[in-house]
Amino acid sequence: MEVVKTEPVDIRCELDDVDMVQKPVEVRYLGHTFPVELMSCPVCGQVYIPESLRNKMREVEETLENK
Amino acid sequence: MEKDFQKLNNLAKTCVQSEAPHCVAACPMHVDIKALCRAVATGDFTAGRRLLEKTLPFAGLICRVCEAPCTGRCLRNTLDSSVQVRALERACMDRGGAPQTTGEWPEKQERVAVVGSGPAGLYAAATLLQKGYSVALFESADALGGSLRGDDRVRDVLAGELQAIATAQTMCNIVVGQDVSVDDLLGQFDAVCLCWGRGQGAEKPEDFDAFTFQHKEKKNLFCAGCMLGGNYTQAIYAAESGQRAARSIERVFQKVSVSAARTGEGVYDSKLYTNLAEEPSVQPLPLADDGTFSAGDAQSEAARCLQCQCLECTKNCTYLQHYKQYSGSAIRPIIKNINIMTGWGTRDANNFIYDCALCGLCGSCCPVDIDLGGVNLPAREFMWETHILPPAVHAFPLRDMEYSVDDMRLARNQQGFEQSRYALFTGCQLPASMPASVEKLYAHLAQSLDGGVGLLTGCCGAPAIWAGREEQAAAVRGTLRADWEALGRPELIVACPGCYKVLNETLPDIPLRFVAEVLAGHLPAGAGVAPGQYAYHDPCTSRHYAGLQQSGRQLAAACGAQVAELPQHREHTVCCGYGGLQYHVNQPLARKTTGARISQSPLPYVTSCSNCRDFFATGGKTCLHLLELVFGAEESKGSSPFAEIDFSKRRAQRRALNRRLLKAFWGETVREEDAGVTVIISDALREKLNRQHILEDDVVNTLQKAEASGRRMLEKATGHHVAYHREGYVTFWFEYTLEAGRVVLQNAYSHRMQIVEKV
Ligand code: SF4
Ligand code: SF4
Ligand code: SF4
């Protein structure tokens, strides 16, 4: 399965008032865990998933659901 | 479960769709008459001829002399008169171009003596030659053909047709039994097949096996044709017996069982069912004096073939059409899908299993009562129990069910009563869809029935049942039972046919009455606001409840409506698209299901189920609920045609209804919760929310938290704030702006995967 990754986006964490950066995080579904790279806040860790990535995720979700 | 799989496998075997058409079963040679008719109907006589040459040796003879037992069994007989198959075969042989020789097998060393050269002998010889054996054909007369020789119908073609056995060694003018004995032949040849006329020789039919035609003692002696008597005196049966004897001979040579696995040879009975109810009568065309058709007439005659098949399930079910399946064909893939070991392949049929409306229509149409819903539902249950049904699939409707049961449920005695003799049970969707009608209904019942009319809302548990979650359904039922007991075990007046079905099946000791029956007996003054013509739609949940079907029609009539029937009604009614949670798992398919039903009549519909009403509205069809005939149709008047199912609005309506009911009937004031923020949502976004199963409550809760905590993001290119929130099995994403102190939603989406944040 390909590693889900986002293009860098100019986005700011408003809680910590810092620019978010690409960071490795994990997504989980149905007992599987995948490493992904997402825009994340270096301080609080909140991440950003743009809508363009959502459709790709849906494909992965479907593959896992039919395993 | 193993045992259940076996049962399901057996069920699949009862499907009659793979049975041969009755004509083909009756044809001793099993010519593919359907395919033949298809070819001829399009004028492709060449394809027809090829088809005949493949299955029917000496087709040029048979198309002239066959007794055509197929026509005796043709289903068209019950409509007008049978398809004239033999004349169609003749047309193919006459117009289908030059003969094509079939390939022959490599030469083998065994030699067979065939005695007699009528139809049986010719077929035995041709079959053996084709398989590569040497054949000596003994004939007592001076030329080949037996009974065919004196037959005027084949005079012109016999010589040409006999070319098919040109490689046989012909032994004319030899009388077996006089010139050479059968035992001598048995000594000289590896096998002997007696295809001579009746009464010749010492052998009797009973000396031979009635199916394989092998002599009971002399294992290399066989017989075929007239000497067997009965049907075998007719050309086509004799011909087939020759072929069958030849196949038996080959089995002896190959040293395999002569009798094993020979289904499909010879004439048999077919169980194929074909529904002729809608078939128009088409009279057959007359043949010319010589028994032939012109090309055009042959085409028309072939087009009369009904192309017999069953497919009653598929003809009636949008879902099966969508998947190009019939119930009988679907069962094995379902079993395979749920049986597969995790990690050992893809579960290709998951969506197929989830998408069924569980409506029971297929079962009510199937000649052998196969109800695919009755397979798909246990499949879902099994998948849920074994953790292969992802919870997210049905999360949205089940969340709605929990909301109905945990947050919106009311169980009250009528004010001034300690106990209820009756209680109105509304179910979960009716109050969400038609709150004003529910309010009027309860007021009317409380006023017109004696002994206290309690109110029970909540849910019957149908969504959990449909999702395969029996445990959760049982819990919902437990709550309902406890409420019912607390009200003093009243008779339930059930306002939803779906609830009626579920309660009737799962809580049989609770006395039930359908609301339509009660209302028909206690019609409020002034009912009958909508005289006019309606087509009555039976909700699929009422399929097996004749009482519900009847009382609904009676109530409509009592309200002044003229009720017409839809083509599929009562036990053959069709689902609206909500059944089995089809809409929640496959919206495009549900749209098709809805569309198929609403196109059945131009009349406005009337029904007893609010879901059917609402689904028809999404397709632009006016459908009134019975309650609207009784209490007025204000709630339908405001709605725009083609309006989407608006789940957020339905939630809000339920909340408001509860507040109104508590105020009006129990004098209690419930304060509206303050959401904290007001979010502006455009119509287009609202539609997207509904399509993606995101509730306005989710928007408000998420944005309220984001605004309160400050935990949000700013996408600089668009200037949108972004916040996300996980609810159950779904993560929601919202983009929004703040404009003059108002929160304006700019975008929303969701996914099922869960993010593990890392600091
Ligand atoms: S209608 Fe056609 S398929 Fe059906 S029995 Fe007659 S010839 Fe056969
Ligand atoms: S239960 Fe209904 S939706 Fe499911 S296969 Fe049968 S007819 Fe179609
Ligand atoms: S209705 Fe469907 S499942 Fe039933 S016998 Fe016919 S094809 Fe088979």
Image (spheres, helix red, strand yellow):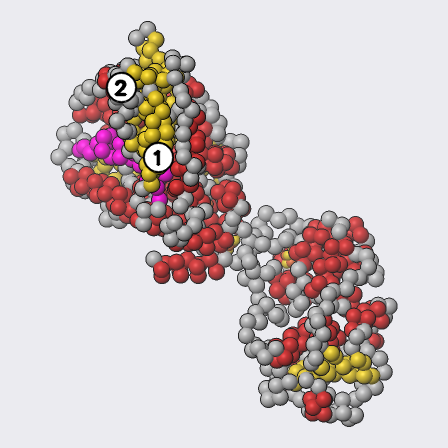
Q: Disc 1 residue type? A: Pro
Secondary structure of the residue carrying tag 2 is: loop
Q: Which residue is mark 1?
A: A35
Lateral position of residue B666 relative to residue B717, left or right: left
Indicate the quadrant where residue B266 lies. Answer: bottom right
What is the quadrant of residue B391 in the picture?
top left
Chain hosting mark 2:
B
**Which percent across, then down, holds residue B346?**
43, 47
B682 magenta-colored: no
Give the percent coordinates (x, y) of residue B542. 39, 43
Identify the image quadrant of the N terminus of chain B.
bottom left
- Residue that carries the numbered disc 2 in the rendered image: B711
* Number of marks drawn: 2
Q: Point out the stretch of residues depicted in magenta.
A: B389-413
Q: Position of residue B405 (x, y in %)?
A: 24, 35
The chain letter under disc 1 is A
In the depicted view, which residue is nearer to us: B589 or B574?
A: B589
Q: Residue at x 70, y 71 (%)?
A: B106
On the question of residue B504 being in view, the answer is no
Q: Residues within 10 Å of mark 2 (few under 14, many from 20)?
A: some
Label 1 packing within 10 angstroms: few (<14), some (14-19), many (20+): some
- Judge whether residue B406 is colored magenta: yes
Task: State which quadrant residue B474 falls in.
Answer: top left
